[in-house]
Amino acid sequence: MFYEPSKNDHGLARNPFNSLVVPRPIGWISSRDEAGVLNLAPYSFFNAVCYKPPTVMFSGGVGSAADGMKDSIRNIEATKEFVCNLASWELREQMNASSASVSSEVDEFKLSGLTPVASNLIGAPRIKESPVSLECRYIKSVEIPSWEPSDKFIMILGEVIGVHIDDEFITEEGLVDVVRMSPIGRMGYNDYSRVDEDNLFEMERPK
C-alpha cells in the first residue's frame, strides 16, 4: 500500500505511522516548575541524537493547559533542566500511570507511587526506582512545522551532564547489563516491547 500522510488516505482503522518507526525508546522526563511543583511524563518520541557531547531529544504535542503547552516543556524552558529516566519492565505500570492527563498542580511522582530523589548537578529530581537517570541541561526548543495549530509539536534538546546507573546492573566486566534492566519501548497503538535474553542478539560491525 501507499498513502500520503497529509491526505490521511491510508484507509486503515488507525493511523499506522506510530507503528512503523519501532520500537521507540521511552523518555521518562522528570522536571519541576519555578514554584517547585514536580512533573513526570513519558514520551515515546525520544532518542539519543549525539555522542559527544551526549545529547537527547524528546518532543511533545499540544497540552491541555490554557497556554496549550505540555507541563514538561513549559517547566524545562523555564528552569533550563530536566532528567530522563529509564522506563523498565518492572516499572511499566508506574510509567503508564504517569502518562495520565492531569492538571499542572498534580505531582505524577505521587500519582504513580514513585520516589523523587535529588539529582547531583541540577534541581529537577530523578526517579529513585529507575535503573538509569540522565541529568540534562536544556539546549533549545525546536517547533516542528505543522499542518494545523492543533498538531503543534515542540522538540526539546538537552545535553546529558550527569549519568546515574544502578550498580546492580553493572557487570564484573564493567559493562551495562541491558537484559537485566529490561528496558521497554513503544510499538504504537497500545503495544510495547521489552529487551530480554530471548530477543537480544550481537553483531560485530565490519572494519
Image: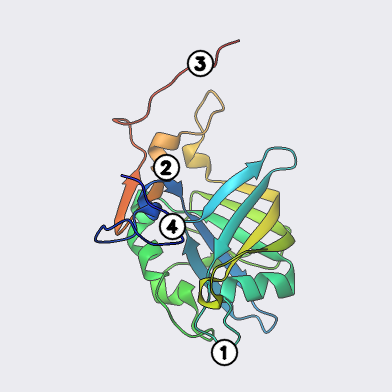
Q: Amino acid at mark 1?
A: Ala
Q: Is residue 180 above or below residue 90?
A: above
Dot 1 falls on a residue whose secondary structure is loop
Label placed on residue 181: 2
Asked if labels 2 and 4 touch by Cβ distance under 8 angstroms, the answer is no
Identify the residue at the far top of this view: 207
Q: Is residue 193 above or below residue 198?
A: below
State the separation of the CA atoms marked 3 and 2.
22 Å
Q: Nearer the viewer, mark 4 or mark 3?
A: 4
Q: Which residue is labeled 1 in the image?
A: 66
On the image, the x and y values in percent for residue 176 come to 51, 33
Q: Nearer the viewer, mark 1 or mark 3?
A: 1
Q: Dot 4: few (<14), some (14–19), or many (≥20) neighbours within 10 Å?
A: few
Q: Which residue is labeled 4 in the image?
A: 5
Asked if labels 3 and 1 touch by Cβ distance under 8 angstroms, the answer is no
Q: Amino acid at mark 4?
A: Pro
